[in-house]
């Protein structure tokens, strides 16, 4: 059995690291294909060193460029490798162009795709990431959904629940394991020790913020007003380019309360996050790390595909609105009760054993032998879906066996439920397919 793992950017390296560790631990044959979308030392190699990962077996070296340029060149490069290596499964992670290219190319070669972080939706199709993850989920055979909410998003798009596995998010594994190492190895005292002010860590790189001069300017104005904080701003290369292009870099480069730094390695960055009073970001992964590390987060976006962080109470969406950013940052800093309340939320992304679960599910699915694209059951089911109210006390798995049906979705007074085998169906409505 051989698994091909496709990565291309900083977050994919970090989030696939625990999966790669688990695959190595179980002695499964694998190859790593790096698309080369991120190529600066501090955006790529640094993470292989910090996370002690093996070198990629292939680097397609796609570099920067338009979406079509990147995606098409990745597809050509990935296709060559996959034809040559003939893996049994291709794993992609998240929502970058690597996920788009990897999942389309694999599915056209009839190689099953496993999507780590399947089912996330911001419901904003102007985001390149929303299109990437939706297309990937069309091409996928094994869906590793981090939460119940992401699993339900998939159900509502017609995905067969038997192929959806709720795993938690591998970022928790990466974050918790490496924090211990970081506390021993990392030294970020030069970033924090010279200021008695509360530490605010900032990152942003999302196209809708940094490629839009009005939004970028609003955020930069907010930073200037937040002089009660010691702000450490780790600047993504895309952001640096735009700050300079729009003459915004000069507005913050000489401010005593703002430290502008190059992207940090994972160990240093985890240390920085964990010691922060507040995190401000438009990053997906950092919203998840904030709740894992119990640091309040302000997300510089108007929507999020991580709504669990907001409903849990650890994250507030403040958009790119200067007044809203400043008001919320000051409130969290001045009101200890609010700060503590935002810290004391439970983590919707699991307790750090996602990679183990994910590899268990993978082996089970691969060994089941029914992974090739859609199974005959899937195809037959799709035009026979019916709805029924269940009055009796009966578990999903028992009902399915007894009636020879596949339960796709369960509705009850709480809303939509995932059809877990042990879920009691009493007083629920089911959307189901007849096998008969
Ligand atoms: C990409 C992903 C985004 C993810 C982010 C993680 C897509 C569509 N976007 O965005 O979902 O959240 O990575 O950080 O896949 N650059 C460098 N050096 C590098 C890489 C990039 O200087 O090593 C500069 C280039 O000028 C490039 C720009 O950053 O044009 C943007 O890079 P790109 O990889 O296209 O998108 P990201 O913004 O990094
Ligand atoms: N990160 C890092 N150093 C930095 C900034 C971010 O190691 O200076 C890590 C961060 O801990 C998280 C990941 O990069 O795990 C998030 O990547 P990014 O924000 O680029 O992408 P996104 O998660 O939004 O796709």
Image (cartoon, rainbow, N blue to C red):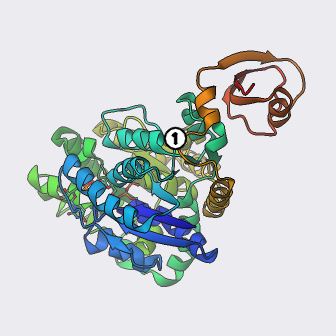
Counting from the top left corner in percent of width and height, residue 390 is at: 82, 19
Q: Which quadrant of the figure has residue 125?
A: top left
Picture quarter with the N terminus: bottom right
Comparing 13 with 230, the one in front is 13
* Mark 1 crowdedness (10 Å alpha carbons): few <14, some 14-19, many ≥20: many
Q: Left or right: where does residue 108 sit relative to residue 359?
A: left
Answer yes or no: disc 1 within 8 Å of ligand 2. Answer: no
Ligand 2 shown in quarter: bottom left
Q: Is residue 105 visible?
A: yes
Picture quarter with the C terminus: top right
* Residue that protrudes farthest toward the right in the picture: 393
Height in image: 407 above or below 185?
Answer: above
Q: Left or right: where does residue 173 sit relative to residue 332?
A: right
Residue at mark 1: 119
Q: Is residue 293 visible?
A: no
Counting from the top left corner in percent of width and height, residue 218 is at: 23, 41
Q: Left or right: where does residue 412 sit relative to residue 334?
A: right
Which residue is painted at 38% across and 47% down in the image? 104
Which residue is painted at 41% across and 35% down in the image? 303
Counting from the top left corner in percent of width and height, residue 295 is at: 52, 56
* Residue that protrudes farthest toward the bottom in the picture: 185
Q: Left or right: where does residue 158 sit relative to residue 238?
A: right
Q: Secondary structure at mark 1?
A: loop
Which residue is painted at 30% across and 48% down in the image? 206
Number of marks in the rendered image: 1
């Amino acid at each position: 059995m051989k698994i091909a793992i496709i990565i291309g950017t900083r977050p994919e390296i970090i989030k696939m690291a625990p999966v790669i560790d688990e695959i190595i631990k179980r002695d499964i044959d694998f190859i790593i294909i790096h698309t080369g979308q991120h190529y600066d030392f501090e955006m790529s190699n640094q993470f292989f060193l910090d996370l002690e990962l093996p070198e990629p077996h292939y680097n397609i070296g796609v570099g920067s460029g338009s979406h079509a340029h990147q995606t098409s060149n990745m597809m050509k490069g990935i296709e060559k490798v996959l034809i040559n290596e003939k893996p049994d499964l291709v794993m992609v992670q998240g929502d970058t162009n690597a996920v788009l290219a990897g999942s389309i190319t694999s599915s056209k070669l009839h190689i099953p795709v496993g999507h780590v972080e399947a089912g996330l939706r911001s419901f904003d199709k102007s985001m390149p990431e929303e299109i990437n993850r939706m297309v990937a989920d069309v091409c996928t055979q094994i869906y590793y959904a981090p939460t119940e909410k992401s699993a339900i998003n998939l159900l509502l798009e017609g995905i067969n629940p038997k192929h959806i596995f709720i795993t938690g998010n591998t970022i928790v594994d990466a974050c918790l394991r490496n924090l211990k190492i970081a506390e021993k190895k990392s030294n970020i005292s030069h970033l924090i020790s010279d200021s008695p002010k509360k530490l605010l860590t900032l990152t942003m790189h999302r196209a809708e913020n940094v490629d839009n001069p009005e939004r970028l300017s609003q955020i930069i104005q907010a930073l200037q007003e937040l002089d009660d904080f010691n702000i450490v701003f780790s600047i993504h290369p895309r952001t640096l380019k735009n700050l300079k292009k729009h003459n915004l870099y000069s507005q913050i480069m000489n401010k005593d309360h703002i430290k502008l730094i190059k992207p940090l390695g994972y160990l240093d960055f985890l240390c920085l996050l964990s010691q922060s009073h507040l995190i401000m970001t438009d990053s997906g992964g950092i919203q998840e790390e904030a709740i894992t590390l119990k640091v309040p987060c302000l997300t510089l976006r108007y929507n999020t595909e991580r709504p669990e962080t907001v409903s849990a109470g650890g994250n507030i969406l403040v958009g790119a609105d200067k007044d809203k950013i400043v008001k919320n940052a000051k409130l969290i800093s001045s009101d200890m009760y609010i700060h503590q309340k935002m810290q004391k939320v439970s983590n919707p992304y699991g307790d750090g054993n996602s990679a183990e679960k994910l590899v268990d599910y993978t082996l089970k699915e691969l060994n089941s032998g029914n992974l090739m694209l859609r199974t005959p059951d899937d195809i037959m089911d799709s035009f026979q879906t019916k709805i029924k109210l269940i009055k009796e006390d009966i578990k999903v798995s028992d009902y399915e066996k007894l009636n020879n049906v596949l339960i796709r979705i369960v509705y009850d007074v709480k809303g939509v439920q995932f059809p877990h085998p042990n879920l009691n169906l009493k007083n629920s409505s089911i959307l189901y397919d007849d096998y008969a």
